[in-house]
């Protein structure tokens, strides 16, 4: 749309990915990142193919300003490793006032492609209790802030905060004014994660249908996960015509978090029959990005988290493992390699079957075991699996050593007796039967009880 080509990829079948890990994600309690960590994550987001990186809220603190400025300077120009061929747009968040907007612009302006993202609440709850202004004043502030942002920058996004609980009719008026004032993207946030997919899809449809000038902007969605519906709501918004999704890596964010990037991208990727859309994301970078964000923020990813959880491509049930060994199509809708993992994992535990156990033995180099030996080891494995959650390769090695590769006994230990204490010399008596059947016993002293036994 502008000379920098800021919105050239906003064609009807592309969903633009706006990542807010470094802004909304960093608002997660305890997820604070330092500047170097933010730079490293921004570089990885660029490699991942994120279209727009919301690098922070520059007015929030001098540290936030500096982080956004350095990302704009150091990561803004990068195209290396990006499949899109264009550098990432670097966005800075600003409340709807000149001071915030100036600060955001100062921080992002050095990036070849930059955006000011300004927001103002539109729900009656926020107008009355938080902002203490009426609807008229709200609209005036939207006009003033968006038009001011456009004097600085060609790319201006406006978000009516708490849109999910705002009067839809009032929203069409407020958003129509934002378009007239020059907004290029209108983002609809379900700030408190209140709506259901049906309601949110309806809202997006209604706004796109009824806002004057709706066809001049990119419509965007920004959902929070308070009811666990963020991904479903975002997809409902996309179905209704949104072509920008605001997301975070691992779904981190304020309270229960934001919509997770990996879930949206993989839903669009895996279900072309449903969405018939694409993103610019290099899905092979998803796992690496998720791990980096988890390590730097200290926010552990739950094992059953879709796409990036440790169990997302792990199979334990015997029936599932048997199916997977016959064809991955039986229990996998995505290949692990697609998200940058090397392979699916068959976890050996109490639900595992003989088939998976045999395959693991082969992988570990025990392909020559007889059926009788495998059965012996499998029985031992099942008994151990009842006590231990997961049986590791080292456990299997021990089982094989015990049950199968047991060297013939040459010396038999009859008994050991040790005596020690704080005022005595450690003394041991050992009795062994030798290969000739003769019993040998002796006593010794040492520096400790074990040493005494060996002596
Ligand atoms: O959740 C929200 O409303 C936001 C806005 C600033 C877009 O994060
Ligand atoms: Zn948010």
Image (cartoon, helix red, strand yellow):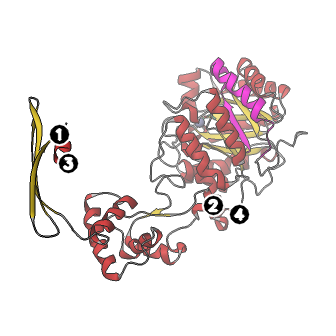
> Disc 3 to disc 2, how far (Cα)?
56 Å
Frontmost residue, 415 versus 42: 415
State yes or no: Cβ of the residue under disc 2 lies below 8 Å from any atom of ligand 2. no
In terms of secondary structure, where does tag 4 sit? loop
Residue lying at 74% horizontally and 23% vertically, measured from the top left? 101
Viewer-proximal residue among 46 and 356: 356
**Mark 2, other Cα within 10 Å: few <14 / some 14–19 / many ≥20:** some
**Residue topped by disc 4:** 276
Q: Is residue 56 magenta?
A: yes
Q: Give the labeled residue for mark 1.
A: 446
Picture layout, residue 421 above or below residue 14: above
Tell us which disc is closer to us: 3 or 4: 3
Q: Is label 1 in contact with label 3 (beta carbons under 8 Å)?
A: yes
What mark, if any, has residue 454 been given in the picture? Answer: 3
Q: Position of residue 323 (x, y in %)?
A: 46, 76
**Left or right of 2 in this view: 373:** left
Comparing 307 with 207, the one in front is: 307
Q: Residue at x 67, y 51 (%)?
A: 205
Alpha carbon separation for disc pair 3 and 4: 73 Å
Q: Nearer the viewer, residue 12 or 6?
A: 6
- Tell which circle, 4 or 1, labels the residue nearer the N-terminal end: 4
Name the outermost residue toward the bottom. Answer: 371
Which percent across, then down, holds residue 209?
A: 72, 50
Give the secondary structure at mark 1: loop
Residue 336, image x and y in percent?
57, 61
Q: Quadrant of ligand 1?
A: top right
**Distance between mark 4 and mark 1 Cα atoms:** 77 Å
Which mark, by number, is residue 68?
none
Query: Would residue 377 be counted in the magenta stretch?
Result: no
């Amino acid at each position: 749309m502008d000379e920098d080509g800021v919105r050239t990829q906003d064609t009807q079948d592309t969903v633009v990915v706006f990542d807010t890990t470094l802004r909304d994600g960093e608002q997660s309690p305890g997820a604070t990142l330092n500047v170097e960590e933010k730079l490293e994550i921004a570089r990885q987001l660029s490699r991942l193919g994120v279209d727009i990186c919301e690098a922070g809220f520059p007015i929030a603190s001098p540290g936030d300003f500096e982080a956004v400025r350095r990302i704009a300077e150091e990561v803004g120009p990068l195209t290396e490793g990006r499949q899109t061929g264009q550098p990432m747009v670097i966005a800075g968040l600003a409340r709807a006032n000149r001071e915030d907007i100036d600060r955001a612009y100062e921080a992002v302006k050095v990036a070849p492609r930059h955006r000011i993202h300004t927001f103002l609440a539109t729900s009656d709850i926020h107008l009355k209790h938080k902002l203490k202004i009426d609807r008229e004043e709200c609209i005036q502030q939207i006009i003033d802030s968006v038009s001011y942002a456009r004097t600085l920058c060609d790319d201006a996004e406006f978000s009516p905060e708490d849109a999910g609980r705002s009067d839809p009719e009032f929203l069409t008026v407020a958003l129509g004014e934002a378009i007239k004032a020059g907004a290029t993207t209108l983002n609809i946030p379900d700030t408190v994660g209140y709506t259901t997919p049906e309601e949110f899809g309806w809202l997006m449809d209604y706004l796109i249908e009824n806002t004057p000038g709706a066809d001049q902007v990119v419509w965007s969605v920004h959902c929070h996960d308070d009811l666990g519906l963020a991904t479903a709501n975002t997809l409902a918004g996309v179905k209704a015509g949104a072509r920008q999704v605001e997301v975070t890596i691992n779904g981190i964010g304020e309270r229960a978090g934001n919509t997770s990037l990996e879930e949206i991208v993989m839903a669009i990727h895996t279900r072309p029959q449903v969405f018939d859309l694409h993103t610019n994301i290099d899905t092979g970078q998803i796992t690496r990005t998720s791990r980096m964000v988890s390590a730097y923020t200290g926010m552990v990813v739950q094992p059953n988290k879709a796409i990036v959880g440790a169990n997302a491509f792990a199979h334990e049930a015997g029936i599932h493992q048997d199916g997977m060994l016959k064809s991955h199509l039986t229990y996998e809708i995505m290949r692990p390699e697609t998200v940058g993992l090397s392979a699916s994992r068959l976890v050996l535990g109490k639900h595992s079957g003989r088939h998976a156990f045999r395959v693991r033995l082969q992988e570990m180099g025990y392909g020559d075991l007889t059926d009788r030996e495998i059965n012996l080891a499998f029985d031992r494995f099942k008994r151990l699996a009842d006590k231990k959650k997961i049986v590791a390769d080292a456990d299997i090695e021990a089982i094989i050593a015990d049950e199968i590769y047991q060297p013939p006994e040459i010396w038999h230990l009859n008994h050991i007796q040790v005596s020690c204490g704080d005022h005595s010399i450690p003394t041991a008596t050992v009795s062994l039967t030798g290969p000739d059947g003769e019993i040998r016993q002796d006593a010794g002293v040492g520096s400790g009880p074990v040493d005494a036994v060996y002596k």
